Image (cartoon, rainbow, N blue to C red):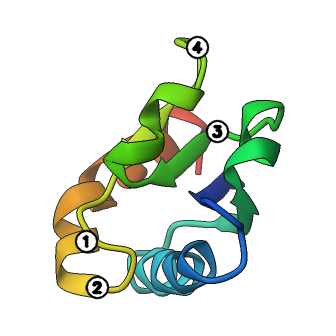
Amino acid sequence: MLEIKTVCGNGIGSSLMLKMKIEQLCNENNIEANVESIDSNAAMGANADVFITVKEFVSIFDKGQKVLVVRSYMNKKKIKEDVLDDLIEISKKLGG
């Protein structure tokens, strides 16, 4: 199962909306995933297969962490364009 964390400044608004959109994409594309929304401070010490956020937060992550960038927290079409192919690829690598 793919462990995904969606990240925004406070972990309750934007990242929660993104979490719901990512869950929908995963369900629609048969990607088995556990998706959690967290704030940027918690993300710095968190473990996940992939973190999804906007470009403003990319710099908080270590080089070893897999980070996908979306242009919007809420626009499902843009989110799909930005991350779906990568999520499918990561899921296949993990055996999902």
The residue identified by callout 3 is 49
Could you tell me which residue is drawn at 64 percent across and 39 percent down?
49
Give the spatial CA distance, label 3 vs label 4.
11 Å
**Disc nearer the start of the sequence (3/1):** 3
Residue 80 disc label:
1
Residue 12 appears in which quarter of the rendering?
bottom right
Query: Mark 3 packing: few (<14 Cα in 10 Å), some, or many (20+)?
Result: some
Q: Nearer the viewer, mark 3 or mark 4?
A: 4
Crowding around mark 1 (Cα neighbors within 10 Å: few <14, some 14 to 19, many 20+) is some
Mark 2–mark 4 Cα distance, whole angstroms, equals: 27 Å
Q: Nearer the viewer, residue 33 or 78?
A: 78
Quarter of image, res 74: bottom left
- 11, above or below 1, in the image: below
Identify residue for label 2. Answer: 76
Task: Assign a secondary structure to mark 4.
Answer: loop
Residue 82 lies, in percent from the top left, at: 22, 58
**Is label 2 in contact with label 1 (beta carbons under 8 Å)?**
yes
Residue 64: image tag? 4
**In the structure shown, which secondary structural element does the residue marked by tag 2 occupy?**
helix
